[in-house]
């Protein structure tokens, strides 16, 4: 999905990290990664809703 949406761009895929309850500064990296991959995430979940018919 990522490669399909970003073909021809120099955008790198970043792994998502789990938010730590004690390391509050790390939350900024997690939120930035989610925002960076927003289009890919939105597209993925839109496709899964149609495919799996799961709206929860």
Image (cartoon, rainbow, N blue to C red):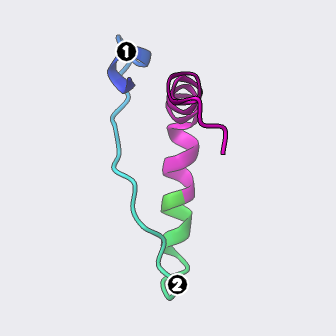
Q: Residue furthest top?
A: 8
Q: Residue 26 has which mark? A: none
Distance in Å between CA atoms under marks 1 and 2: 34 Å
Determine crowd level at label 2: few under 14, some 14-19, many 20+ residues with C-alpha closer than 10 A. Answer: few
Q: Position of residue 21 (x, y in %)?
A: 52, 84
Q: Position of residue 55 (x, y in %)?
A: 66, 38
Residue, x 54% and y 52% (percent of image)?
32
On the picture, is 31 further left or further right than 12? Answer: right
> Front-most of 39 and 47?
47
Looking at the magenta stretch, what is its main secondary structure? helix
Q: Residue furthest right?
A: 55
Q: Residue furthest front?
A: 53
Q: Secondary structure at mark 1?
A: helix
Residue, x 58% and y 22% (percent of image)?
50
Please give the range of residues in magenta. 31-56
Quarter assignment of residue 4: top left
Residue for badge 1:
4
């Amino acid at each position: 999905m990522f490669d399909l949406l970003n073909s021809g761009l120099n955008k790198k895929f970043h792994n998502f990290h789990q938010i730590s309850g004690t390391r509050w500064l790390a939350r900024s990296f997690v939120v930035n990664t989610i925002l960076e991959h927003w289009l890919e995430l939105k597209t993925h979940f839109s496709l899964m809703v149609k495919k799996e018919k799961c709206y929860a």
